Amino acid sequence: MTQSARNRYELTVGQLAERSGVAVSALHFYEAKGLIHSRRTAGNQRRFTRDTLRRVAFIRVSQRVGIPLAEIREALSRLPEERTPTVDDWAALSESWREKLDERITQLQRLRDDLTDCIGCGCLSLNRCALANPYDELGKQGPGPRRLLVSAAKDPRPPAAECISCES
Amino acid sequence: MTQSARNRYELTVGQLAERSGVAVSALHFYEAKGLIHSRRTAGNQRRFTRDTLRRVAFIRVSQRVGIPLAEIREALSRLPEERTPTVDDWAALSESWREKLDERITQLQRLRDDLTDCIGCGCLSLNRCALANPYDELGKQGPGPRRLLVSAAKDPRPPAAECISCES
DNA sequence: AGCGAACCTCAAGCTCCCTTGAGGTCAAGT
DNA sequence: ACTTGACCTCAAGGGAGCTTGAGGTTCGCT
């Protein structure tokens, strides 16, 4: 492959940034974290293969759903290294993500239903509601949207405790 | 109201922490950020009214959905200051949150559907997919799960752009 | 009065996810 | 040859959301 031919199939970091909508600094960061990879030119500049666009797309999508970079990295590491990932490779990855999305949707729906219940009883209970009581281990890792994709609750909810705000 | 009577209706920070499941340090933090309020005893200790439990519950619930503290603070500030919030006050707040939840659910569902589409076309397009392209202003504020509750997309999606990974 | 647990106030530290800046190199156009 | 813009590295900064630690006070009980 000639150098010029290469140029048609590879992207500079600037091009990748522009086309993916991600800042150059963020791309550097992703590379440092092992989420994307590049070869270097003789002049030490990064050259990304075109499928890096897909990787970046995948990263952003995953982030929007609430998955931390470390986990995304792990998922991406399951793509074949030796060859350019095929559509099927990507489909498999996306499929697993889709399942997580489904779980998250189910979880939010329950959250919504429980919120409605809580309004009904006039009680925003920390112990009784799924609202404050995420039956998942991720909930224990502290609050915040850091890890939104939780393993969807095993259904045995914790024993209904007292209502923290209604009782004495 | 006597001091002892007061004690029955107020909570120390430790009690609030225990009953809400939130660390004392976090409660201090919330107070510093104006999400909760306390009176101080003669000895400079915090005393929280009982409805603070509900506030904390509301905070945690909101966080789980992905709402940043600043926004939660703003929502809470709509509760009446002069009197203890009634069930109706809380219901109004929760109702507005429920709507956001609905929006969020809808958004995730579309995300999921689009992901399926993308698998279909074999293309994880940054420009075409809702996936990478959250038609909402919050998406522009950078990535991450920091602000997941977006104003549900006005439906005119952006003009279908080229597929960033499929074309040349 | 004395003890320990719980409380107080800063200030600093931590994780995540980047951005900004300084100082320097590379590549393409004139 | 020169300029300009894109690129490089590395270190530091920033915001969100807390936690940890030091040093000191107060509460409740015996």
Image (spheres, coloured by chain):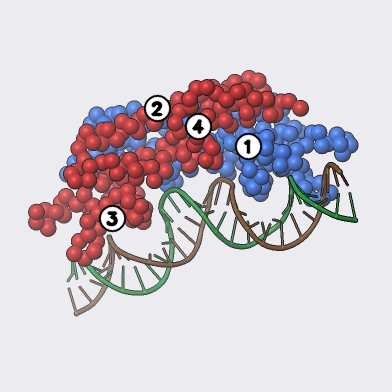
Chain colours: A red, B blue, C green, D brown
Do the residues at pointers 1 and 3 share their chain? Answer: no
Q: Chain of mark 4?
A: A
Give the quarter of the image for residue A130: top right
Question: Under tag 1, what secondary structure?
Answer: loop
Disc 2 residue crowd, few under 14, some 14–19, many 20+, Cα 10 Å: some
Cα separation between marks 4 and 2: 15 Å
Cα separation between marks 3 and 2: 35 Å
Question: Under tag 3, what secondary structure?
Answer: helix
Q: Amino acid at mark 2?
A: Asp
Which disc number belongs to residue B21? 1
Which disc number belongs to residue A12? none
Horizontal side of A157 relative to B27 (left or right) equals left
Q: Residue at x 9, y 56 (%)?
A: A2
* Residue A146 seen from this side: yes
Do the residues at pointers 4 and 2 share their chain? Answer: yes
Tell me residue B117's x, y (percent): 28, 29
Do the residues at pointers 4 and 1 share their chain? Answer: no
Disc 4 residue crowd, few under 14, some 14–19, many 20+, Cα 10 Å: few
Do the residues at pointers 3 and 4 share their chain? Answer: yes
Tell me residue B116's x, y (percent): 30, 28
Q: Residue at x 71, y 25 (%)?
A: A166
Cα separation between marks 3 and 4: 41 Å
Q: Which residue is labeled 2 in the image? A: A102
Dots 1, 3 in contact, CB < 8 A = no
**Relative to the observer, which residue lies in front, B33 or A66?**
A66
Tell me residue A63's x, y (percent): 40, 41
Q: Residue at x 70, y 29 (%)?
A: A165
Q: Amino acid at mark 1?
A: Gly
Horizontal side of A142 relative to B158 (left or right) equals right
